[in-house]
Image (spheres, rainbow, N blue to C red):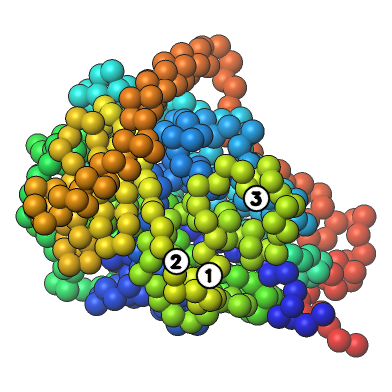
């Protein structure tokens, strides 16, 4: 069988809180991302890719399941990701793939695998219900875990942080497993390698910080029309009372840019491992993120909204069968599940249990440039902190519509107005389009039902968490298995055989 005809390996390299706006690959004039650039140059770059929920855990639940968060009750960072929900890891495993996770996935609940055959690291955030919002007291901050402005004011350099230690470990174990797959002739395999950078805190090691001159750091565009949710977010993160200085803002963006380059270096290490293990030519690589970061734009930080810097994500595919080019067609993370099924060559009738509930659709026609008629609707939802009612985003063509029962609707042409400064809802020339989106929201989305379910699950989760805090701790946090008695060279092994087995490429006699 020729290399090109093999079932391809599939690797997802995921950042956390990476907005495409801050990547050289997406034309930022300062930020250096040479390894992502190289993948984009030989593959497909998506210029209108979105998350389906601009918050870590919900976005990852929709990414893994191919479903919107309202369909799986994955509302916030303390919602359980139920074990009964099929994921693309389950599906690829059923198709004969070795499935592996290294790094962050923010699974909440006792199932910390969700179809992955092995997991190389623990997670970085709690797996219980501690971070449950309270929509019945939506105006009250929960100081223990809500974002505040400390990450902005304290931005700078450090020799190490928990995030640096975590990502170094994530990359080390992933790289080692890639080489071991080659040594043991494991194929096909699928890996998700998921980093925490460039997520705040905005702290970078000096070698990445020193890539950039402070004087060159561009400042955000903070002037923009306000709206109720922006005001809620500013209060929620205390940006209304804790005003950072210009230098603090510059430092935060400086560190973020440095950490984008640090993440890019991890892409380079992983691609190098694939190349050195002679697996690169048969591996589809996907680089994306769970959501973006406002990074001071509109006076906002972090995520939790549907403006472009928060809701858009980078998405680059490279590998066998992937065309070279770019596409502006709106797509989202729920499209990856059906795409992976197509790349794996799944028979249309083979996996009905996996395909029945998918909200996305395969991107293979765009990846292979086999059609010019790929039109659709991207939907995203927000049902977490700093809100009291569900929020909905709809993206079709050049237009984005944002709906919330307690807020005025918003309509933007993101092609002609990328900063989303002009709300077209009140523009008579766009009345029919605004009505179209309003009708879509009313027909396809039951906001009140979603809200009642959000509140119901919040009650349940707070009760469970309060009970679990009493008595002996029962932890759901993943404990990576490791048996040192089977590693390296031990007395029950022939050391020469161990040396031969773990050398790649093998010595040719």
Q: CA distance from mark 3 to mark 2?
A: 26 Å
- Disc 1 vs disc 3: Cβ atoms closer than 8 Å? no
Mark 3 or 2: in front is: 2
Count neighbours of disc 1 (C-alpha within 10 A) and say few if under 14, some if 14 to 19, many if 20 or more.
Answer: some
The disc placed on residue 64 is none
Where is residue 196? Give x, y as percent. 44, 52
Q: CA distance from mark 1 to mark 3?
A: 22 Å
Residue 493 image-quadrant placement: bottom right
Label 2 element class? loop
Total labels drawn: 3
Q: Which of the two labelled residues, at mark 1 and mark 3, occupies the earlier sequence position?
A: 3
Count neighbours of disc 3 (C-alpha within 10 A) and say few if under 14, some if 14 to 19, many if 20 or more.
Answer: many
The disc placed on residue 89 is 3
- Disc 2 vs disc 1: Cβ atoms closer than 8 Å? yes
Q: Residue at x 7, y 55 (%)?
A: 223
Q: Which residue is mark 1?
A: 365
Residue 284 image-quadrant placement: bottom right
In the shown orientation, is residue 135 left or right of residue 44?
left
Label 1 element class? helix
Q: Is residue 166 visible?
A: no
Q: Residue at x 38, y 54 (%)?
A: 377
Q: Which residue is mark 2?
A: 374
Q: CA distance from mark 2 to mark 1?
A: 8 Å
Where is residue 169? Give x, y as percent. 55, 56
Q: Residue at x 33, y 25 (%)?
A: 448
Q: Is residue 507 visible?
A: yes
Q: Which of the two labelled residues, at mark 3 and mark 2, occupies the earlier sequence position?
A: 3
Q: Which of the two labelled residues, at mark 2 and mark 1, occupies the earlier sequence position?
A: 1
Where is residue 263? Give x, y as percent. 43, 64
Q: Residue at x 55, y 68 (%)?
A: 364
């Amino acid at each position: 069988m020729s290399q090109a005809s093999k079932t391809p390996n599939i690797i997802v390299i995921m950042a956390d809180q990476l907005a495409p706006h801050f990547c050289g690959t997406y034309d930022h004039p300062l930020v250096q991302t040479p390894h992502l650039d190289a993948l984009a140059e030989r593959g497909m770059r998506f210029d209108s890719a979105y998350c389906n929920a601009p918050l870590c855990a919900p976005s990852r639940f929709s990414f893994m399941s191919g479903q919107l968060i309202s369909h799986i009750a994955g509302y916030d960072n303390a919602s359980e990701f139920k074990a009964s929900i099929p994921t693309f890891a389950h599906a690829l495993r059923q198709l004969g793939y070795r499935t592996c996770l290294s790094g962050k996935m923010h699974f909440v609940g006792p199932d910390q695998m969700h179809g992955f055959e092995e997991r190389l690291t623990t997670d970085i955030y709690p797996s219980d219900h501690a971070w449950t919002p309270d929509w019945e007291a939506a105006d009250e901050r929960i100081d223990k875990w809500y974002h505040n402005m400390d990450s902005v004011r304290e931005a700078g350099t450090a020799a190490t942080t928990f995030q640096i230690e975590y990502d170094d470990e994530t990359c080390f174990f992933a790289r080692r497993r890639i080489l071991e797959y080659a040594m043991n002739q494991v194929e096909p395999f699928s890996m998700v390698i998921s980093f925490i950078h460039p997520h705040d805190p905005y702290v970078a090691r000096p070698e990445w910080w020193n890539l950039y001159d402070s004087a060159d750091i561009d400042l955000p565009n903070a002037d923009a029309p306000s709206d109720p949710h922006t005001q809620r977010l500013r209060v929620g993160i205390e940006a209304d009372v804790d005003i950072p200085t210009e230098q603090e803002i510059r430092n935060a963006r400086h560190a973020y840019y440095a950490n984008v380059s640090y993440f890019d270096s991890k892409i380079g290490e992983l691609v190098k491992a694939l190349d050195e293990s002679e697996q690169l030519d048969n591996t589809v690589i996907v680089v994306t993120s769970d959501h973006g970061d406002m990074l001071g734009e509109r006076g906002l930080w972090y995520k939790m909204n549907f403006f472009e810097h928060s809701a858009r994500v980078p998405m680059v595919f490279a590998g066998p069968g992937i065309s070279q080019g770019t596409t502006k067609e709106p797509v989202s993370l729920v499209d990856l599940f059906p795409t992976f099924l197509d790349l794996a060559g799944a028979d249309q009738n083979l996996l009905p249990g996996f395909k029945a509930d998918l909200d996305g659709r395969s991107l293979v026609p765009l990846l292979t440039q086999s059609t010019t008629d790929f039109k659709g609707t991207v939907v995203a939802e927000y049902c977490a902190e700093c809100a009291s009612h569900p929020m909905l985003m709809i993206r079709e063509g050049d237009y984005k519509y944002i709906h919330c029962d307690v807020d005025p609707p918003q309509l933007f042409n993101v092609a002609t107005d990328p900063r989303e400064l002009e709300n077209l809802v009140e523009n008579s020339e766009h009345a029919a389009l605004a009505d179209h989106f309003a009708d879509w929201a009313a027909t396809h989305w039951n906001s009140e039902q979603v809200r009642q379910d959000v509140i119901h699950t919040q009650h349940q989760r707070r009760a469970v968490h309060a009970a679990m805090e009493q008595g002996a701790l029962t932890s759901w946090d993943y404990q990576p298995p490791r048996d040192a008695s089977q590693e390296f060279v031990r007395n029950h092994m022939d050391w020469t055989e161990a040396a031969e087995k773990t050398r790649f490429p093998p010595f040719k006699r």
